[in-house]
Amino acid sequence: MAKELAKSYSPKDFEDRIYKYWMDGNCFRAEVDSKKKPYTIVIPPPNITGQLHMGHALDETLQDILIRYKRMSGYSALWLPGTDHAAIATEAKIVEDMKKDGVT
């Protein structure tokens, strides 16, 4: 008998199990291979506003394609979370919060 799919996705039903599998398999571990030419992409985190858009999706997709292509081409490829790239958005958010606290 076929199992009926849930009406909505519930992350708690899946993500802990999948994350444990990734951790147990050392999926987040990077090892240097001095025999291969290095190739790295630094991933900026989402900006402070939390407003993601299609540009973010496109950027992540292109990074994924590039890093996989380089890895399959024999590079020692690393896709690494990096630093915040949205200083203007960060400043605007902080200034907004400061104004709420009466700071000018």
Image (spheres, rainbow, N blue to C red):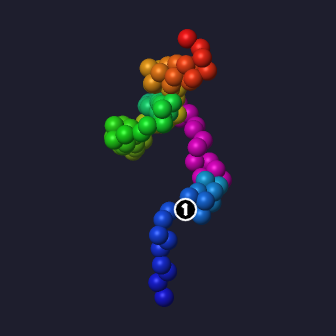
Q: Position of residue 22 (x, y in %)?
A: 60, 52
Q: Is residue 32 magenta?
A: yes
Please give the count of numbered marks on the rendered protein.
1
The residue that appears at 56% across and 33% down in the rendered structure is: 32
For residue 54, say whether it is visible: yes
Residue that appears at 50% across and 62% down: 9
Q: Which residue is mark 1?
A: 10
Is residue 32 or residue 22 the one in the foreground? 22
Q: Position of residue 27 (x, y in %)?
A: 57, 48
Q: Main secondary structure of the magenta part?
A: loop
Image location (x, y in percent) of residue 2: 47, 84
Q: Secondary structure at mark 1?
A: loop
Closer to the camera in the image, 86 or 98: 98
Few, some or many residues within 10 Å of mark 1 (<14, 14–19, 20+): few
In which quadrant of the rendered view does residue 63 lie?
A: top left
Residue 17 versus residue 55: which sits nearer the camera? 55
Is residue 27 shown above or below 78?
below
Q: Which residue is most to the top? A: 104
Which residue range is magenta in the image?
Answer: 22-35
* 82 sits to left or right of 20: left
Identified by mark 1, the residue type is Ser
Q: Is residue 56 above or below residue 103?
A: below
Q: Position of residue 4 (x, y in %)?
A: 48, 78
Magenta residue check for 53: no
102 or 65, nearer to the observer: 102
Q: Where on the picture, by quarter, is residue 28?
A: top right
